[in-house]
Image: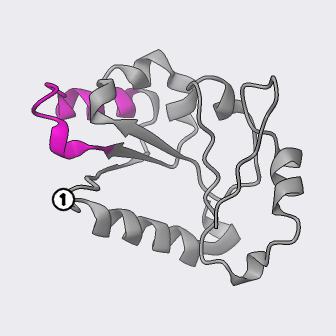
Amino acid sequence: MVRQIETGDLCHLESDLVARHLQGWALDQLDFLFIENVGNLVCPAGYDLGERAKVVLLASTEGEDKPLKYPGTFNRANAVVISKIDLAEAVEFDRAAADANIHAVNPDVTILATSARSGAGMDEWIAWLEAVKAQGDTGM
């Protein structure tokens, strides 16, 4: 199930917007609820939506400099998922530099590399999600 939340002239989601749009959902029947906050990498980071974990998606096609350009977003993350890793070589993505930049702003964050095309890293991503779920409210 997907529901789009219009933020109007705001550059980010706020918890009351999310709460209003979740009314009527059987949340106790969900294994996971993903709240995707798209847009720039500045505004969303500072807002608590009641999430158990914050995950930043960094496409290899975006470059390895983003953690240094948007440290607040990466600093608050529990995990960084580097997507489109199958394109890394073609776009000259430097994985070692990306990891170093991510850890420069968040030394303890989990970094996962994935490819939807090949399936690479998906088992690790799912295992991370399951571990967060198993920790309940005590772990994150």
- Residue 64: which quarter of the image? top left
Furthest toward the top, the residue is 69
Q: Is residue 109 above or below residue 45?
A: below
**Rendering coords of residue 16 (x, y %):** 89, 47
Residue that appears at 63% across and 40% down? 37
Q: Position of residue 92 (x, y in %)?
A: 13, 25
Question: Dot 1 corresponds to which residue?
Answer: 118
Which residue is painted at 66% across and 77% down in the image?
30
Magenta range is 83-104
Closest to the observer, 43 or 101: 43
Question: Going by the image, does 119 lie left or right of 79?
Answer: left
Instruction: Give the side of residue 60 with respect to residue 67, left or right.
Output: left
At 79% from the left and 78% from the top, the residue drawn is 26
Q: Nearer the viewer, residue 64 or 119?
A: 119
**Image: 109 above or below 58:** below
Q: Position of residue 81 (x, y in %)?
A: 38, 47
